[in-house]
Amino acid sequence: MPHSDVQSDAQRRSGRDSQIDLHLDPDALSACVSCGLCLPHCPTFRVTGEESYSPRGRIDAMRSVVSGSPADAQFVDFMETCVQCRGCEPACPSSVQFGALMEQTRVALADRRLITPRWQRLGFAALGRHRLLLVGSTLLAVAQRLGLVPSRLGLSRLPIRRPKRLQSTGTGVWLYVGCVMDAWQRDVHHAAAQLITSVGETFAVPERDGCCGALHTHAGLHDATRSLAERTMASMPGDAAVVVDSAGCGAALKDYGHLLGTPEAAAFAARVVDVNEWLAERIDRLPVPVEADRRSVIVQDPCHLRHVQRVHQASRTLLAHVADVVELDDDGLCCGAGGAYSALQPGLAGRIRERKIEAITRAAAQSGAFDLASANPGCSMHLEGVLTEMAAGDRPLVVRHPVQIVADALRPGP
């Protein structure tokens, strides 16, 4: 039985059941040998227990449509309920590029208006208009205070006021600030800037704020993604490294070479580096922590840091400079945030999050840690909304970006 939170909408939109060309590479589809090693790493399969909500089940559905079956409501549901965490890819012995298959399938469905209805497209369009996004975010924060935002979304408290916009200090590296990250977690940028300065480097902030297109990619909005990618590249010219403190944005920026298919895009993508990755390579240049007592910090790996960029060890190197790192026992499973997934599929996202919360609670009980490090805004906000209501001993678990934890530990006391 379908588990989509928007199944009725999917049925309405796919009332135009028809054959559709997904434009999928047959060799890429046939690479899956249905061995099942992906199943334990798929969050939607873990919470539903249904084969159709697994990577190989979704690939089987793709094969069916490629063979001529209609893209009906059930097919749309299978595609829309994928978190796109890509946790299946490292586990696959055949190196199936499931993420690419899912992205292309969603492009085909979005082009036919079978997914991503107009109201969603309007929301995604706002991400590329930064002033509008800032105003909208403030209004959403006010609505939160008035109890108008559904609690089942589990969002953390959005800021009504933000720190001042960062000012460039030089041209050593670009510090990418993005869209939602700058609207909702600008304090992370300030912490990243502090650490970049601490290792003796200067940074430049793009004059034109923009969106990397990561959420548009998830939604199948290919043309909008390409347009945003070109604008983002133009905002950070030259050869300096592009340092990114959002795992999802970093993964998107590193994929520009594939997305645009030009030498210029490939060169830009090669300059992109996650902030944890960049700082870990300069760990010996960071100051010695001010406090003698080391605290314990639990690490939650965002999927796009662990499974896509595959640089999640860097956050541990950085955190170990000031704290004792505590691992989760769930083998890096997705938390259910998935960009806009937690808003579009709150039921499934909530069930996936429950498993992650259980793992975090176990780690907190065993270690006595009160801090959870997460290097992606979607993950941190998805988890924080629940964790702040829980307490480990007499203190709540606090979710922060690794750079915030390290910057606080290195900041002189009063």
Image (cartoon, grey):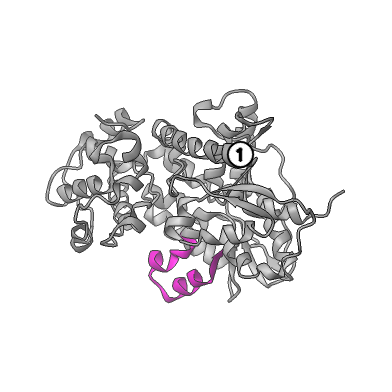
Q: Where is residue 201 in the image (x, y as percent from the top left)?
A: 71, 70
Residue in the image at 49% along x and 53% along y? 248
Q: Is residue 199 magenta?
A: no
Left or right placement of residue 164 versus residue 387 in this view: right
Q: How crowded is mark 1: few (under 14 residues within 10 Å), some or many (20 or more)?
A: some
The residue closer to the viewer here, 108 or 247, is: 247
The answer to whether residue 213 shows anywhere in this view is no
The quarter of the displayed image where residue 289 is located: bottom right
As drawn, 7 above or below 85: above
Q: Name the residue under label 1.
A: 137
The residue closer to the viewer here, 13 or 95, is: 95
The magenta span reads 252-274
As drawn, 68 above or below 364: below
Residue in the image at 56% along x and 62% along y? 314
Left or right placement of residue 247 versus residue 307 in this view: right
Q: Report the predominant secondary structure element of the magenta stretch.
A: helix
Helix, strand or loop status at disc 1: helix
Residue in the image at 35% along x and 47% along y? 41
Q: Farthest residue in the front direction? A: 366
As drawn, 33 above or below 171: above
Mark 1 is on which residue type?
Ser
Location of the N terminus by quadrant is top left
Left or right placement of residue 399 versus residue 14 in this view: right
Q: Farthest residue in the right direction? A: 414
